[in-house]
Image: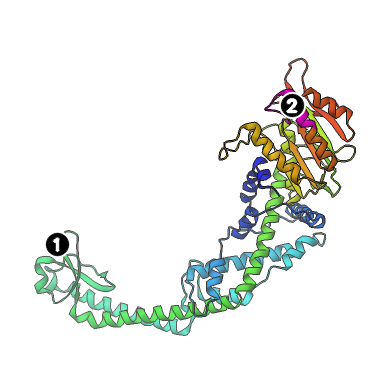
Amino acid sequence: MDEHTFSVLEFSKIKNQLKEKISTAIGELIVENITPKINLQQIFNNQRETTEMREIISYDGIPPFSRLEDISSELRRSAVKGSILDAKKIIKILKVLKISRLIKKFLLKTKEKYPLIRERAEKIRTFSELEKEITQCIDEDGVVLDRASPELRKIRRDIMKKEQTLKNKLETIIRSSRFAAIIQEPLITVRQNRYVIPVKQEKKVKFPGIVHDKSDSGATLFIEPFVVVELNNLLRQLIKDEEQEILKILKKITSLIGERAQEINDSVLSLGEIDFIYARAVLANKMKAVEPKLNQNGFINLIQARHPLLQGPVVPININLGRVFNILVITGPNTGGKTVTLKTAGILTLMAQCGLHIPAVEGSEVSVFKKIFCDIGDEQSIEQNLSTFSSHMKYIVQILREADYDSLVLLDELGAGTDPTEGAALGMAVLDFLGKEKSRVIATTHHDSLKTYAYLTKGVCNARVEFDEETLKPTFEISIGLP
């Protein structure tokens, strides 16, 4: 599909609306890379998935989605032999596993009439034993628990005992009348991972110990008494033992994750697809959209269609193309809605081929097009320093070179930007060529001779944007068959 088309039709804004409804990092990536499908059955299935999810939301409730971070780098790292993930990264993976399991359980409990969603849910894997192992060892804040191993529990008990013994000795020193005039404050603190006592700087010679730090003013020294050096050493060794045991536990869990990394990644992809379907359903509900009928015959029948990006009250329009005529020529006043009509036909077709429901009413129908071309607005090429007319002609030449039976072509103000007579002749030549190629075309124009051309040419039909005869203001309604 032509990238120019996505830009002109502002499809990125539709993607942004979808992203607002997405919960997972992989779902967001899927939205970012969304492209219109051209296989009719695939599009039909995607449309049905959106419908099924809307029904699930209406009758069964909202799936238990939660904001999930990207874990792809953690999974890749876990698969490397000997690697160690920190506890917080492991908890990030655990959250994805839990939410995946809950969503699968929720969707499989829904009614049998949602076969496509159930099929998607079946592809989500559950990792109960891995979840259990992680939960046994690490809490939700990423703290490795005492119960993670008997050795860790023993080490931590020894640490508590050594700390208490150490504090008791230091408390004895603090309470001693011998050191009352020497100690700055009667408290125990830690400096450089050693338990110390704050001592007045001028009294340090009377307090036997090792200086580890001093206050900003220099008036206080933080000294480790010689009598507790050995206890501090033993405590530091126990803390190192604790760190080593924690690394051993994390390495074990990382290895377990690494063994299932590919399965987890595949499951996350399935979860992302379901997240994308959910976002489509929520957006469809917001837009009051419908599942369109689909065909491969170039038939477009949009009933009471609304442009999805317009704010405020929108006048619905009807667009019909491809059954009786393949080319629709729209005339009418500027700002009367001609360009919006083109964009509505284009963006609703893109949406439908991406599996999105369209803002129209039941019975609306769209065709599957392999190519959609849009020459809308003043898309002047600054890099090549082309005039407005030359820029349009450059793109029209590309359209004429590539358009065929499976193409939808949207042309705004065909023949504008040059001499009226030449512009009208050029417009007729373009429409003649596209007509022979059997492309489906919607073109707007202000040339009267193109109205006459549409009236006299088989396969071409006139339409006009209406205006109020009393106020002489446009009503933004489209009347097909009238020049």
Crowding near the residue tagged with mark 2, few <14, some 14–19, many ≥20 C-alpha atoms within 10 Å: few
Q: Secondary structure at mark 1?
A: loop
Horizontal arrangement in the rendering, residue 242 relative to residue 441 (left or right): left
Please say whether residue 286 is one of the residues in the magenta stretch: no
Q: Based on the displayed image, in which of its 4 quarters is residue 197 positioned? A: bottom left
- Single out the residue that lies furthest toward the top: 470
Q: Which residues are magenta?
A: 413-428
What residue appears at the point 65 percent right and 57 percent down from the top-left corner? 30
**In the rendering, at what x and y percent does residue 209 appear?**
16, 76
Horizontal arrangement in the rendering, residue 43 relative to residue 376 (left or right): right
> In the rendered view, how is the structure colored?
rainbow
Q: Nearer the viewer, residue 480 or 264?
A: 480
Q: Which residue is mark 2?
A: 422
**In the rendering, at what x and y percent does residue 295 appear?**
85, 49
Q: Nearer the viewer, residue 397 or 271?
A: 397
Horizontal arrangement in the rendering, residue 242 relative to residue 472 (left or right): left
On screen, residue 138 above or below 309: below
Horizontal arrangement in the rendering, residue 429 relative to residue 236 (left or right): right
Q: Amino acid at mark 2?
A: Glu
Q: Based on the displayed image, in which of its 4 quarters is residue 247 positioned? A: bottom left
Q: Which residue is mark 1?
A: 219
Q: Amino acid at mark 1?
A: Ala
Please say whether residue 416 is one of the residues in the magenta stretch: yes
Q: Secondary structure at mark 2?
A: helix
Is residue 410 visible in the rendered image? The answer is yes
Viewer-nearest of discs 1 and 2: 2
3D distance between C-alphas at marks 1 and 2: 94 Å
**In the rendering, at what x and y percent does residue 382 appear?**
56, 37
Crowding near the residue tagged with mark 1, few <14, some 14–19, many ≥20 C-alpha atoms within 10 Å: few
Is residue 288 visible in the rendered image? The answer is no
**In the rendering, at what x and y percent does residue 128 appear?**
63, 74
